Image (cartoon, rainbow, N blue to C red):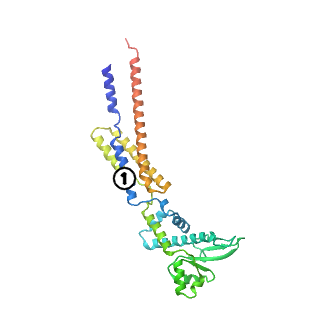
Amino acid sequence: MREENIRYWRLQKQRAPAPPGAGERLDTAVIGGIQVSDIIHQKIAERQIPPDVLRAFHQQYPNHGSFVAAVHRLRGNPERLNGLISGIKGKLFEDEYVAWLNHGHLPAGYHAELAHSANQPAWDIVVRGPHGHVRELLQLKATESASYIEHTLAGHPRIDVVTTHEIFQQAVAHSGELHRHLIDSGISLNDLNHHVAAGVCEGIQADPFGFHFPGLVLALCVITEALSFGRGQISLRDMAANIRDRSALAFIAGGCAWLAINAAGASLLGPPAAIAARVLGGWVRTGLRERKALLQSLARAEKTLQRLARPAVV
């Protein structure tokens, strides 16, 4: 009887799936390495792009979807990309000047608001009085071309133009009557250019999809499990189950890293989130497998005991 029990438990041990071991550690290392590689290559999340640049983009181009996707779509066309930058810069200029007016630079009861349409032809900002009446209309031009401003004034001579500090100074120095129709915003054109250009550069570095398909991890899963099957360490069924489980955990770890980065707006959270999710998932997987194996062993043992407990047939 004892020898039969020993043979039974040895057979169950051979049938039990091999522990994850090195495969789990390899997957965790590769997933963490992918996230660290993104940091080294300065890949960022859209939330890390300056919020005022994102807001200006969505106001100017409400139908363009994602800022990062738009930048990636136009990066191969410098002319169109420059047009996108100019549009964002112009809207950011309007946002900053409206905010400046409404923070103590208008008479009591007055407030400024942007035109509802991003392509309003005649004016960009309206100043309203205490009873909602229109007090003043303004055009805003964040341009480096004085001739463009002259053309704008010629089209709408009764609406003054608000321009950047540098252009206003140039108009005062060189253009006689032009500066009489200009308003100095006090906002630097160079600062606007640098700020928007930096946001666009970060958009180019950002991942337009955000979530990485774990192709490398999937390939490693297939290779390592196939090698284990070739050495006779696992069955074909176990090999397929291991590939399925490890691939699913890689997707989950990548998703957790994506959520952490986008929730906090910090790429540095990607590696620890991915590693923690993969390790925790591996523990859960191992625990479930051991529980399943234990329940199967108990069921077989119960059947054996029931068979042994039957009365012998004389």
Residue furthest toward the right? 131
In the displayed orientation, state which residue is furthest to the front: 104
User: Residue 126, located in which quarter of the rendered image?
Assistant: bottom right
Q: State whether residue 180 is above or below residue 78.
A: below
Q: Residue furthest top?
A: 314
Instruction: Bin the neighbour count of mark 1 within 10 Å (Cα to Cα): few under 14, some 14-19, many 20 and up.
Output: some
**Placement of the C terminus among the 4 image quadrants:** top left
Q: Position of residue 215 (x, y in %)?
A: 37, 52
Which residue does the image show at 40% across and 34% down from the upper left? 290
Can the viewer see residue 238? yes
Is 54 placed left or right of 11 in the picture?
A: right
* Frontmost residue, 89 versus 1: 89
- Relative image position of residue 75 (x, y in whole percent): 42, 68
Horizontal side of 149 relative to 16 (left or right) equals right
Tally of numbered discs: 1
Q: Is residue 83 visible?
A: no
Image quarter in which the N terminus is found: top left
Residue type at the position of mark 1: Gly
Q: Residue furthest bottom?
A: 176
Would you name the residue on which mark 1 appears?
33
Identify the secondary structure beneath mark 1. helix
| Residue drawn 34% across the image and 44% down it | 23
Q: Residue at x 41, y 52 (%)?
A: 271
Residue for point 40% across, 36% down: 289
In x, y percent, where is residue 168? Answer: 54, 81
Residue 208 versus residue 205: which sits nearer the camera? 205
Q: Quadrant of residue 293?
A: top left
Residue 163, position as x, y percentages in the image: 55, 78
